[in-house]
Image (cartoon, coloured by chain):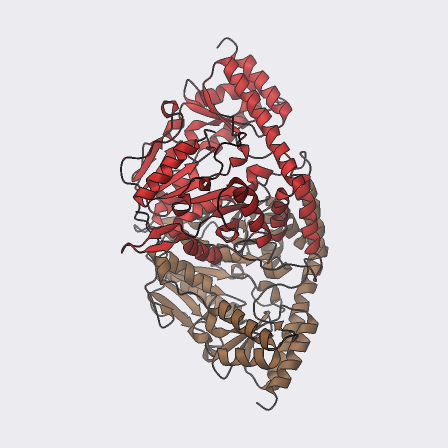
Chain colours: A brown, B red
């Protein structure tokens, strides 16, 4: 008899997005013709940089001719892209990352989800709360947790991120082998200082722990003195894996390209205490269960690193950040406390009530969709997330409508 | 202390391709200027169909304009593509597959590798020998096997495919919960009759077993009366999952698009014997660890189903099959027994000696690269695989050189 992986039965059906969709439908029915503005999901809305489009077309043309056609590429990605990344994203910031330590993939979601596969199921894991749900769900699927009790899984250590600690998780006191960190954070938009991140690296070094560092939003950091890569911290190469993406950097959410950095000296251990290179294990996993990213997509991603591509991508990011500034201004005026939005496209707002209450109010009174914080964990139940991914005009209209709705509240 | 998944240590390093590469280098050094013809790896060499190129360009242009730009698509793939597949690949052949039972992905390698994740680690598995290594390695990684002993993993049931059984695996007599089948087969090129496949479906039904059916090479079947999809067999919807790919059908090896069919009535069981829908489990896995295929790539794949795209893809396949015919003719003339090549781009040749011996001879005397069967399992140690993926001229030259080299042997 064929049997299922019963760990899947522990997963709680996420009703968040279906509930959001139902509420939107109900609103539309009651308010025909009323335009809804979506500031919920964190999805790019602006066109790809023209430099990427041009490179994309050129590569498609190469696929049209037997002489320039490309079949299977290296599972790890083409060197032309890996070298540009090493040079621009790391060397230029004084961080040591070699091209062959970079694994090109089709998404940071996939990479953050898949990476746990090469680790033992018998490890203790700490995750932030609120959290990007993929970190949790993929560990549940792999059998590293117990059942869900009151919205939290047994055997996971939840690091609460609240206004009490400026939304930066505290280093756990109990033994932890693996920690997920994400800065600028999704969903809170909080950023970490170089000093605080250095403390995490020291802690991991001392405890032979591993940090999975999700830097998918690093492009939104506007202060060049702030830390963008964990490899800017001395010692991080031994204890940290970093996830990056072109999704938010250059609008690749529908085009699909990302990468993971696994430094060669980053080690994990077998039961006998012998060290093994995670680079070699990940390479085995990546080349066995993945077959490389579409060639034209890799060429489009490469173009992000041309002088024109850099300029265009920066303009797109700046456009979203103008929106984030507009959202923050409105929240200031309305007297809502928040974090994020300064070096992140997300603003995490204290709802002063249950997150669904404020969601309902913004939808029904302003026709604006946000994401209720409850979808990101227990610590989100009294927050909402507003996303800066939209046009200036839509954000302006949304803020004016929210102001009108909240007046006198 | 962070610990590794020790199952990875059981994997044997595959020296096949690195050994092949080393031998080629050595040959090139000794024979400067001698052109090597590669009939080893099964990788498309001909340009994408012009219909796909045109659709690809149009979709890239959509990404260049905010008004038509696409961000995140459905993880399961766009309906425009899933509907074309349901209609053309299944309904047109009398097989019932609904669009929402089709999961678009970036490769059949990924899908055949990932699918086992939703199954218990406590199941018995049968795989053919010779075999596509991904079926084995991904189960080793998941901990379903013991150690490798003499090239075979403990706890796996190997179904030997030899000239004794026309390279069609025999239904196992011992209890088996999961079986991997691949037709037209990689590496042998063997095909299965509808009747024989029907026996597998009956067996699976009776034993509540699951068949993972890899049909990545179905487009090479030249006889329309032969079975292309397992869903042409009554009852298969309850016991089989099918993997398909655009890689070989339309030259997408470097463009990346494939799909998996999970019928809604296909069930697996928990320890208590309760049935669970694999569709719903796979949907959870797919949407948690994957984020959809690149939008322009999906548009390019959709174009395979236009009248022009069908004609062009068929021409490409016919071109490769002309090569396969040429290879078979040469083997007939030289007196080598083989299977495949009739409805498959692969010809699996009895080497009459150790597979590496014939590999060395073809390389050193004819400058032709094949794949030594040893890379596919114990039953391959006296076979080689020749692939039809190349230009007519290269295959013609290769066959003439092989004839010259083998003369009088």
Q: Answer with left or right where residue A390 lies relative to residue A135.
A: right
Residue B375 at x, y percent in the picture: 43, 31
Query: Where A99 sits versus A222, above or below?
Result: above
Query: Where B110 sits versus A389, above or below?
Result: above
Residue B6 at x, y percent in the picture: 34, 48
Residue B267 at x, y percent in the picture: 37, 51
Q: Nearer the viewer, residue B223 or A116?
A: B223
User: How many numbered discs sit on the rendered protein?
Assistant: 0
Q: Is residue B1 visible?
A: no
Q: Residue furthest top?
A: B408
Q: Residue at x 69, y 40 (%)?
A: B50
Residue A262 at x, y percent in the picture: 49, 52
Residue B394: name its quadrant. top right
Q: Answer with left or right where residue A322 lies relative to residue B332.
A: right
Residue B250: name its quadrant. top right
Q: Residue furthest bottom?
A: A408
Q: Residue at x 49, y 61 (%)?
A: A213
Q: Nearer the viewer, residue A222 or B110?
A: B110
Q: Is residue B181 visible?
A: yes
The quadrant of the image that shows the N terminus of chain B is bottom left
Query: Where B44 sits versus B335, above or below?
Result: below
Q: Nearer the viewer, residue B178 or B204?
A: B204
């Amino acid at each position: 008899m064929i049997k299922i992986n019963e760990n899947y039965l522990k997963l709680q059906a996420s009703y968040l997005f279906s509930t959001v969709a139902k509420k939107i439908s109900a609103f539309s029915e009651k308010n025909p013709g009323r335009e809804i503005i979506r500031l919920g999901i964190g999805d790019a809305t602006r066109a790809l940089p023209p430099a990427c489009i041009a490179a994309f077309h050129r590569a498609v043309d190469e696929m049209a001719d037997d002489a320039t056609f490309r079949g299977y590429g290296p599972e790890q990605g083409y060197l032309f892209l890996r070298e540009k990344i090493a040079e621009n994203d790391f060397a230029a910031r004084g961080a040591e990352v070699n091209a062959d330590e970079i694994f090109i993939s089709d998404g940071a979601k996939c990479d953050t989800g898949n990476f746990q596969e090469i680790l033992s199921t018998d490890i203790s894991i700490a995750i932030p709360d609120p959290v990007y749900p993929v970190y949790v769900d993929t560990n549940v699927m792999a059998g590293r947790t117990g059942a869900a009790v009151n919205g939290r899984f047994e055997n996971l250590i939840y690091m609460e991120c609240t206004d009490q600690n400026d939304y930066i998780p505290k280093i756990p006191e109990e033994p932890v082998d693996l920690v997920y960190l994400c800065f600028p954070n999704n969903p809170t938009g909080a950023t970490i200082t170089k000093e605080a991140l250095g403390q995490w690296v020291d802690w991991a070094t001392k405890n032979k722990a591993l940090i999975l560092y999700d830097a998918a939003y690093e492009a939104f950091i506007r202060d060049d003195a702030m830390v963008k890569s964990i490899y800017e911290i001395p010692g991080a190469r031994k204890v940290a894996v970093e996830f990056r993406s072109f999704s938010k950097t250059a609008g690749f959410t529908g085009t699909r390209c990302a990468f993971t950095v696994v430094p060669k000296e980053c080690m994990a251990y077998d039961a006998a205490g012998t060290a093994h290179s995670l680079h070699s294990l990940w390479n085995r996993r990546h080349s066995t269960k993945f077959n490389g990213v579409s060639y034209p997509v890799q060429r489009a991603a490469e173009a992000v690193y041309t002088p024109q591509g850099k300029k265009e991508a920066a303009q797109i990011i700046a456009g979203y950040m103008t929106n984030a500034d507009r959202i923050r201004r409105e929240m200031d005026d309305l007297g809502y406390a928040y974090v994020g939005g300064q070096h992140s496209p997300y603003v995490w707002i204290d709802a002063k009530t249950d997150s669904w209450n404020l969601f309902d109010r913004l939808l029904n009174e302003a026709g604006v969709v946000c994401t209720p914080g409850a979808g990101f964990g227990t610590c989100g139940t009294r927050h909402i997330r507003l996303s800066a991914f939209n046009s200036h005009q839509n954000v302006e209209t949304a803020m004016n409508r929210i102001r009108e709705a909240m007046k006198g509240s």
